[in-house]
Amino acid sequence: MQQQAYDFSLFAPQRAKPAKKPPLRTVEGGKKPQTGLKKAAVSFGNVLCCAAFLALAVLLIQSKVTITELTTQEQKTQAQLTDAQSTYNYLNGELNSRTNMASVEEIANRLGLMKVDDSQITYVRLEDSSVLTAAQSPVKQWSGWLKSGALNIMEMLDP
């Protein structure tokens, strides 16, 4: 008795019947040979496509480089801004500490200064006739006369 599990003939490839091939027809001429001009045009097209691809790659790299440079510049500027703000805060604190009233009074006392007393204040009342005016330069006088003359003319022309 033969066991089916070990019968390798069952698994052997069976020969299929050969398919009937349709008869071939031939056409005269076939593919025409390329002329020198067409070969040159195809080669030029290939070179042009490669050049365009290379140009796009270079432009992409250049844009990435530009972005990197601008990012670095922004970081440097941000660091400078932070440093300037820190300096501002320090100097503002120094200014506040030196100009507070206690500090000013202490320095004034060291210098021998004292607060103003009401008896030290004197008010002087001047009349209109005793007012002094500084002499103007001739250029200012001429420009004042021209200005007032122009204003007078504008007032006369304005209805």
Image (spheres, rainbow, N blue to C red):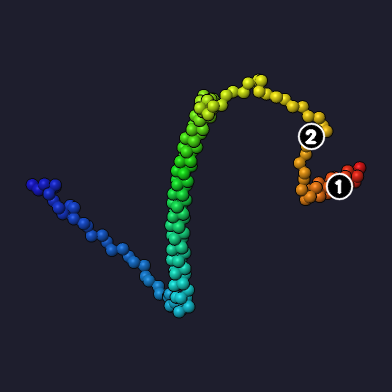
Count neighbours of disc 2 (C-alpha within 10 A) and say few if under 14, some if 14 to 19, many if 20 or more.
Answer: few
Q: Which mark is residue 49?
A: none
Count neighbours of disc 1 (C-alpha within 10 A) and say few if under 14, some if 14 to 19, many if 20 or more.
Answer: few
* Residue 18 in sight here: yes
Label 1 – label 2 distance at C-alpha: 26 Å
Give the amino acid type for the residue marked by disc 2 in the picture.
Val
The residue lying toward the viewer, choosing from 82 and 90, is 90
Residue depicted at 40% across the width and 75% down the height: 26
**Residue 152: image x %, image y %?**
88, 45
According to the picture, the residue beneath numbered tag 1 turns out to be 149
Residue depicted at 47% across the width and 38% down the height: 87
**Element assignment for label 1:** helix
**Element assignment for label 2:** loop
According to the picture, the residue beneath numbered tag 2 turns out to be 131
User: Which quarter shows the C terminus?
Assistant: top right
Q: Is residue 31 left or right of residue 15?
A: right
Looking at this rendering, what residue extends furthest in the top direction? 118
**Residue 9: image x %, image y %?**
16, 54
In the image, residue 134 sits, relative to residue 119, either above or below, namely below
* Callout in the foreground (1, 2): 2
